[in-house]
Amino acid sequence: DTEVTQTPKHLVMGMTNKKSLKCEQHMGHRAMYWYKQKAKKPPELMFVYSYEKLSINESVPSRFSPECPNSSLLNLHLHALQPEDSALYLCASSQDPPLTGLSYNEQFFGPGTRLTVL
Amino acid sequence: AQKVTQAQTEISVVEKEDVTLDCVYETRDTTYYLFWYKQPPSGELVFLIRRNSFDEQNEISGRYSWNFQKSTSSFNFTITASQVVDSAVYFCALKGSGNTGKLIFGQGTTLQVKP
């Protein structure tokens, strides 16, 4: 099973709402990632979790709050977002985490959540 | 600094034509990894191939082939006998040996295959 699942597929929220994006993988991967992708642009890395611990935060605003409850799940909590945060949010996983000397592994991506902030 | 350049923003071909997507990279790392991903309109990035810097063998997978040339810092991707289902955005990406896990993506090439 080489599948990464994400829910919801689409999300519309106001600037005062609190919502969460969910990501799940059952490949036994020990690294999970959040990316943000604007239209006609490549994905931009936001966070990396290695062995369920946050290892990389690419200077993401605090209105985005990641959480890794266990090795299969990754959440992204959203609060007080701005319209410019509207984008496709992609989750990915890889077999071996960064900083282990085995960081060559390919990342497998989920289908994404298309977020619109009004 | 690391950088990936995909000079072709959009390519349009007619079905059954061969098409090559160019990728040029820059890195000072001696060990690095190159990837190609396909992003169809549905949005999911689909992994196609990984190439290690120490392995310059070209690879063929069905209608897909990849030409890795360290001398020109290029990792080009050719689709033979293109099909409508090949229509997508294709990203070339680089990962250095710095173990940060960060993929450096090119800007992507949008391929449209017309019937």
Image (spheres, grey):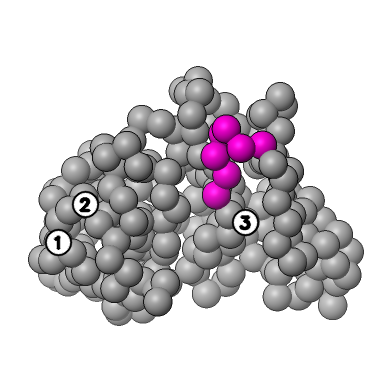
Q: Are marks 1 and 3 in contact (CB under 8 Å)?
A: no
Q: Secondary structure at mark 1?
A: strand
Q: Is residue A103 above or below residue A22?
A: above
Q: Give the amino acid type for the residue marked by disc 2 in the picture.
A: Tyr
- Looking at marks 2 and 1 on the same chain, the residue that comes earlier in the sequence is marked by 2
Q: How far from the left and from the top, in percent, is residue B63?
A: 77, 65
Q: How far from the left and from the top, in percent, is residue A15?
A: 20, 65
The picture quadrant where one finds residue A87 is: bottom left
Dot 2 corresponds to which residue? A49
Q: Residues within 10 Å of mark 2 (few under 14, many from 20)?
A: many
Residue at image x 27%, y 54%?
A31
Dot 3 corresponds to which residue? B90
Which subunit holds the residue at mark 2?
A: A
Q: Are marks 2 and 1 in contact (CB under 8 Å)?
A: yes
Q: CA distance from mark 1 to mark 3?
A: 30 Å
Q: Is residue B85 left or right of residue B26?
A: right
Dot 1 corresponds to which residue? A68
Q: Residues within 10 Å of mark 3 (few under 14, many from 20)?
A: many
| Residue A36 is inside the magenta segment | no
* Magenta span of residues: B50-56
Q: Give the amino acid type for the residue marked by disc 3 in the picture.
A: Tyr
Q: Residues within 10 Å of mark 1 (few under 14, many from 20)?
A: some
